[in-house]
């Protein structure tokens, strides 16, 4: 079994409050969970208005598949969510 994880650091330009930030992040997480069947949560910058780190995890039988799955998620965010900027992402796979 392979567990793939990805941390995605985001910049949320124009956000003026934590309430607005949480609305955007909550929507993004729900879309990732629904569209990609992946676990996702906000894991960093909880109290910073214009920054967030999202953690995503997937389980697969092959490391290449898990890696591509996570890359597809990052690509999707960059392409379909113009309200957020991906600053950086880090993908790791672990064999259990």
Image: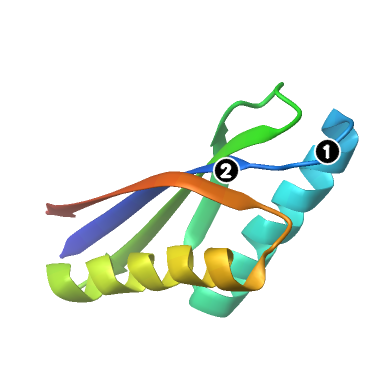
Residue bearing mark 1: 15
Residue bearing mark 2: 10
Label 1 SS = loop
Within-10-Å neighbours for mark 1: few <14, some 14–19, many 20+ = some
Quarter of the image for residue 83 reads bottom right
- Which mark is first along the chain, 1 or 2? 2
- Per the model, the C-alpha gap separating discs 2 and 1 is 12 Å
- In-front residue for pair 38/14: 14
Q: Residue furthest top?
A: 47
- Percent of width and height locating residue 91: 28, 51
Residue 89 in the image: above or below residue 70: above
Residue 46 in the image: above or below residue 58: above
**Residue at horizontal 25%, vertical 69%?**
66
- Percent of width and height locating residue 26: 73, 51
- Asked whether residue 4 appears in the rendered view, the answer is yes
- Asked whether residue 62 appears in the rendered view, the answer is no
- In-front residue for pair 11/73: 11
Give the side of residue 62 with respect to residue 7, left or right.
left
Within-10-Å neighbours for mark 2: few <14, some 14–19, many 20+ = many
Q: Quadrant of the C terminus?
A: bottom left
Label 2 SS = strand
**Residue at horizontal 24%, vertical 57%?**
3
**Residue at horizontal 64%, vertical 33%?**
51
Give the side of residue 71 with respect to residue 62, left or right.
right
Quarter of the image for residue 49 reads top right
């Amino acid at each position: 079994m392979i567990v793939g994880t990805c941390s995605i650091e985001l910049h949320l330009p124009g956000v003026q409050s934590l309430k607005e930030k949480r609305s955007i992040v909550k929507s993004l997480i729900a879309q990732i969970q629904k569209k990609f069947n992946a676990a996702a949560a906000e894991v960093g910058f909880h109290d910073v208005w214009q920054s967030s780190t999202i953690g995503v995890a997937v389980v697969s039988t092959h490391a290449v598949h898990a890696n591509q799955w996570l890359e597809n998620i990052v690509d999707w965010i960059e392409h379909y969510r113009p309200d957020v900027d991906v600053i950086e992402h880090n993908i790791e796979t672990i064999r259990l």
